Image (spheres, rainbow, N blue to C red):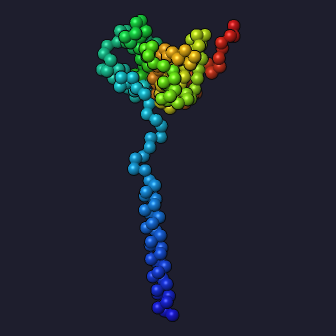
């Protein structure tokens, strides 16, 4: 009887050990080899990352600006875009960090290509350009927005900013824009 209990105990230990090894191997096979990023990578303009890059980084990357407009924050560095009189504006906060970049776009950039590449925008805002059918399409988690007209497919501007939430974007990046269309209201 004692031999039967010992054999049973050994068999039981072998089954438990085998089960433990198989479960361990299964769990390891399910684990990804690379940890996915919690958010998609944000956009940058010529290596300038809003929320990270400082004023001296901008000057090192783009050279001396055409002018510096002083404002309530740290000011705006104005650069030629190569698209006529439409400049690239790099807005600097009081602490010297880039918080927004406005870039005019060429006529080859199309609205449907942006949506195909980025998906649905997280936020759509309306402003003075709305009368011409343009809206601001914002991709909050990517740190990029576009002023575009979905009917004509035209894209006028690209905005870069640190990835953020809708409240912060509307308060800091686009304070003069509305969630509601005002077209036709006089």
Residue 22 in view here = yes
Which residue is drawn at the image coordinates 37% and 10% (left, top)?
82
Q: Return the residue found at the far top.
A: 85
Evaluate whether residue 91 shows in this view. no
Examine the rendered structure and indicate whether residue 36 appears above or below residue 70.
Answer: below
Q: Residue at x 46, y 59 (%)?
A: 27
Q: Nearer the viewer, residue 28 or 116?
A: 116
Residue 50 to residue 24: above or below:
above
Instruction: Kindly identify the residue that appears in the image at 39 percent across and 23 percent down.
Output: 45
Residue 95 is drawn in which quadrant? top left
Position of residue 156 relative to residue 10, above or below, is above
- Which residue is depicted at the point 44% across and 77% down? 14
- Placement of the C terminus among the 4 image quadrants: top right
Could you tell me residue 157's position as x and y percent?
48, 16
Q: Is residue 96 left or right of residue 167?
A: left
Place of residue 54 in the rendered image (x, y in percent of width and height, measured from the top left) = 37, 24
Residue 155, percent from left and from top: 49, 16
């Amino acid at each position: 009887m004692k031999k039967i209990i010992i054999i049973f105990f050994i068999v039981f230990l072998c089954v438990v050990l085998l089960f433990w090894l198989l479960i361990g191997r299964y769990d390891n096979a399910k684990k990804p080899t690379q940890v996915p990023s919690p958010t998609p990578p944000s956009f940058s303009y010529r290596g300038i990352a809003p929320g990270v890059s400082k004023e001296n980084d901008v000057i090192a990357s783009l050279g001396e600006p055409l002018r510096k407009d002083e404002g309530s924050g740290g000011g705006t560095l104005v650069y030629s875009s190569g698209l006529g009189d439409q400049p690239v504006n790099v807005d600097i906060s009081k602490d010297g960090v880039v918080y927004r970049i406005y870039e005019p776009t060429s006529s080859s950039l199309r609205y449907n290509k942006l949506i195909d590449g980025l998906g649905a925008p997280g936020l759509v805002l309306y402003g003075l350009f709305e009368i011409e059918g343009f809206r601001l399409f914002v991709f909050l988690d990517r740190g990029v927005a576009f002023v575009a007209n979905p009917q004509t497919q035209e894209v006028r501007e690209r905005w870069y900013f640190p990835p953020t939430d809708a409240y912060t974007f509307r308060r800091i990046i686009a304070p003069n824009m509305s969630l509601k269309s005002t077209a036709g209201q006089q």
